[in-house]
Image (cartoon, rainbow, N blue to C red):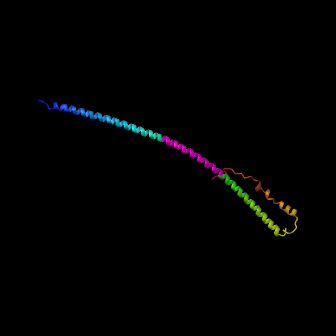
């Protein structure tokens, strides 16, 4: 009995050979695709690492600038506090001077209108001067104090 498998065994081995050939091609293609994928992943990882380095450098630069600006701000706030203290002291002195001028003007009016001293009268200026020596505005405390201020005089 002749079997038809003899003829089919030849074609079957041909099919196996073709399948093996296709499997090998597919395997080679898959290996190449996996290699390309690994290369892409590695390139992406390298790009990300480069970006991390760049962002860290930029962050350090920004932090340095921020620290510098903060220091300048503190210096300006300190100087501003000193200037406020000086302004306060100068305003205080100005008020004292205005008070002295006002007092002197009122004293002169009182003296000239009170009949004690008349402008056209002949007066003894020595007596008038001796009367005014008791109140010498230039010897008052306000004129002898230096303007002093510290940076922490007006801390908020």
Using the image as rendered, state which of residue 44 and residue 67 is in the foreground. Answer: 44
Write down the region rendered in magenta: 52-79
Against 125, residue 148 (above or below) is above
Does residue 23 appear left or right of residue 63 in this picture? left
Residue 33 drawn at (x, y percent): 35, 37
Image label count: 0
Residue 106 drawn at (x, y percent): 78, 66
- Quarter holding the N terminus? top left
Against 130, residue 3 (above or below) is above
Residue 147 falls within the magenta-colored stretch: no
The image quarter in which residue 65 lies: top right
Using the image as rendered, state which of residue 135 and residue 35 is in the foreground. Answer: 35
Against 10, residue 47 (above or below) is below
Residue 30 drawn at (x, y percent): 33, 36
The image quarter in which residue 144 lies: bottom right
Residue 74 falls within the magenta-colored stretch: yes
Against 115, residue 77 (above or below) is above
Please report the residue visible at 68 percent of the width from the left and 54 percent of the height from the top.
85
Q: Main secondary structure of the magenta part?
A: helix
């Amino acid at each position: 009995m002749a079997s038809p498998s003899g003829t089919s065994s030849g074609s079957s081995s041909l099919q196996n050979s073709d399948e093996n050939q296709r499997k090998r091609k597919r395997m080679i293609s898959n290996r190449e695709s996996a290699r390309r994928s690994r290369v892409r992943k590695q390139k992406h990882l390298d790009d990300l690492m480069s970006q991390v380095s760049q962002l860290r450098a930029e962050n350090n630069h920004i932090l340095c600038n921020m620290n510098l600006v903060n220091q300048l701000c503190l210096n300006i706030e300190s100087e501003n506090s000193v200037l406020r203290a000086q302004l306060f002291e100068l305003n205080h002195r100005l008020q004292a001077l205005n008070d002295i001028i006002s007092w002197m003007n009122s004293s002169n009016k009182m003296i000239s209108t009170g009949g004690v001293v008349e402008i056209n009268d002949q007066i003894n200026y020595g007596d008038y001067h001796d009367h005014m020596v008791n109140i010498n505005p230039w010897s008052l405390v306000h004129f002898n104090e230096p303007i002093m201020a510290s940076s922490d005089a007006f801390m908020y």
